[in-house]
Amino acid sequence: MPQIQEVLPKYLQIAGHLRDQIVRGDLPPGAEVQSERELAVAWNVARPTASKALQVLRQQGLVESRQGSGTYVRAPHAAPRARERLERASTLGTMYSDSESVEFPAVGFAIGPAHVTESLNLPAGDRVVRRQRIISNDTGVVELSTSWFPGYFAEIAPRLLLTERVGGGTLGYLAKAAGKRAAYVHDQACARAATDDENAVLGLSACSPVLAYWLVAYDSADSPIQFDEAVYPPERWAVRQEYPVNI
């Protein structure tokens, strides 16, 4: 019989929260992380618990301790997941950190690829709205991301056709402008060879592997309202999860 899953230990919850901030760029490379004492107060835990959280981050290579100074963020070889970007948009009103820049090389109407129209429950070859983004930081391009929407959304959410940020992420904008509020998302990831265009954008050689991450957002009526495809270059961790194990 299925069992209710146990909650992660407190120190792993603290470490996970800090890791998300580091990967999102809210704590950029070189930034000082809260001390054991500050974490203990903020999370209402004992100092040994806070110490274990920082030790987890050190073991994962995300932070380093400097004698007599504190704990500082190292440059992460990771990319924010969709969940982390959505949480950031919800709490801070933007999906991107101050250390990230965003370009919009392709925005407008397009004939939807088969995997897009199928995911959006649209007829094959239907016209859709495409918003492609190149996300970079000091280390280079970290993500090539494309969002797709049913074509008629352009009439009720016209800013989808602008080559600029819409504020709060596209899902937040759809909720305000069109009353299309996401209730849940389904995502999946796979490794594949990069296309020629992806190689050019990500600065990769021919036949390089990439991680392709698909996300479909559904409203409360279980209707798909947005399809995202994010492509990550090699050696950037974009799928991470921690969970208790009872064997």
Image (cartoon, grey):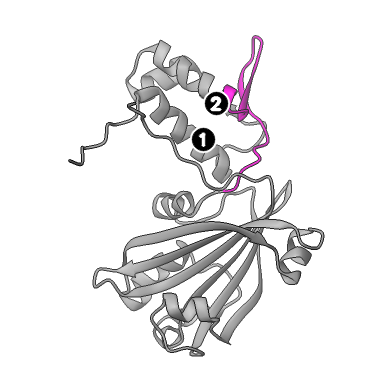
The number of discs equals 2
Q: Residue furthest right?
A: 205
User: On the image, numbered disc 2 is attached to which residue?
Assistant: 57
Q: Residue at x 64, y 38 (%)?
A: 76
| 124 lies above or below 239 | below
Q: Earlier in the sequence, mark 2 or mark 1?
A: 1
Which residue is depicted at the point 34% across and 70% down?
Answer: 175
Mark 1 nearby-residue class (10 Å; few <14, some 14–19, many ≥20)? many
Position of residue 194 measured from the top left corner of the image (x, y, whole percent) = 70, 64
Q: Is residue 66 magenta?
A: yes
Q: CA distance from mark 2 to mark 1?
A: 7 Å
Residue pointed to by mark 1: 19
Residue 63 in the image, given as x and y percentages of width and height: 61, 26
Inspect the magenta stretch and tell me whether residue 210 lies in it: no
Q: Report the amino acid beneath label 2.
A: Leu
User: x%, y% of residue 215?
Assistant: 46, 63
Stretch in magenta:
59-79
Asked whether, in this view, residue 61 is left or right of residue 118, the answer is right
Q: Indicate the position of residue 186 as horizontal and vertical percent values.
A: 39, 61
Q: Is residue 41 left or right of residue 194?
A: left
Q: Dots 2 and 1: beta carbons under 8 Å? A: yes
Camera-side residue: 189 or 197? Answer: 189
